[in-house]
Amino acid sequence: MIRVVIVDDDPMVRTGLRLILGGEPDLDLAGEAGDGKQAMDVIRDLRPDVVLMDIRMPEQDGLVTTELLLSRPAPPRILVLTTFDADDLVLRALRLGAHGFLLKDAPPPKMIEAVRAVARGEPVLSPSVARQVIAAATGGHEPRRPRALAELAVLTEREREVAIEVARGGSNADIAASLSVSVATVKANITRIFAKLGTDNRVHVAMKVRDAGLL
């Protein structure tokens, strides 16, 4: 059972998320909060596995709350809820260590799978958010092909295929289905990609792929 806490200042959003997630047998909607300060107490008391975190909230926003939560021992996994106009905030949340990013209007099946994936320890970045984050992080400049291609040259052909799918925002299960391999194979390839590129973050891999012009 995956214990989930919803943090959003909009009651309608919280209601919608309850309706989407509440019928799943493996998801326990343990509680909710309307702002970051309230969330700190709720999460301390309920100890959820996953927190669905809005960024823009009164009193204490989602960025401050995420930073405070991740500084605690054994913190929950943070799945940030974002919108198309929040590029800079998403980048800041990424730097703070958020585990995933999801658009508030994502289809219910995608939202449910995102919660499960984050609970399993798989970072989540929806394709549309991935495009925004990569574009914002690279300042909209032309891909820096020579350097990026040289860095990606250390990857095997299979690792490069996996890296491209990561850049497209696919989960481990999505990538496995696309490449007709097992999820375990995908995980092993991602571990090797991280080691070879000197990173532990999917977005950084995606940025390299974009710079190389492979998307």
Image (cartoon, rainbow, N blue to C red):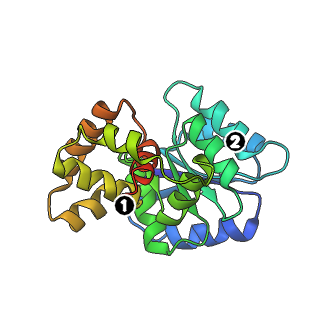
- Residue 212, position in %: x, y? 39, 50
Q: Secondary structure at mark 1?
A: loop
Task: Depth check: give the residue in front, 123 or 157.
Answer: 157
Q: Which mark is residue 112?
A: none
Q: Is residue 211 visible?
A: yes
Q: Earlier in the sequence, mark 2 or mark 1?
A: 2
Question: What is the quadrant of residue 34 in the picture?
Answer: bottom right
Task: Depth check: give the residue in front, 214 or 83.
Answer: 214
Pick the quarter of the image with the C terminus: bottom left
Q: Secondary structure at mark 2?
A: helix
Question: Outermost residue toward the front?
Answer: 146
- Give the residue type that dot 2 points to: Leu
Q: Write the residue at 77% across / 40% down.
A: 37
Q: Write the residue at 65% across / 41% down.
A: 92
- Residue 83, position in %: x, y? 66, 64
In the picture of the structure, the residue carrying the numbered disc 1 is 170
Task: Depth check: give the residue in front, 154 or 196.
Answer: 154
Q: Is residue 1 visible?
A: no
- Give the left or right position of residue 186, taking residue 127 as reference: left
Q: Nearer the viewer, mark 2 or mark 1?
A: 1
Question: What is the quadrant of residue 190 in the picture?
Answer: top left
Number of labelled discs? 2
Q: Are marks 2 and 1 in contact (CB under 8 Å)?
A: no
In the picture of the structure, the residue carrying the numbered disc 2 is 63
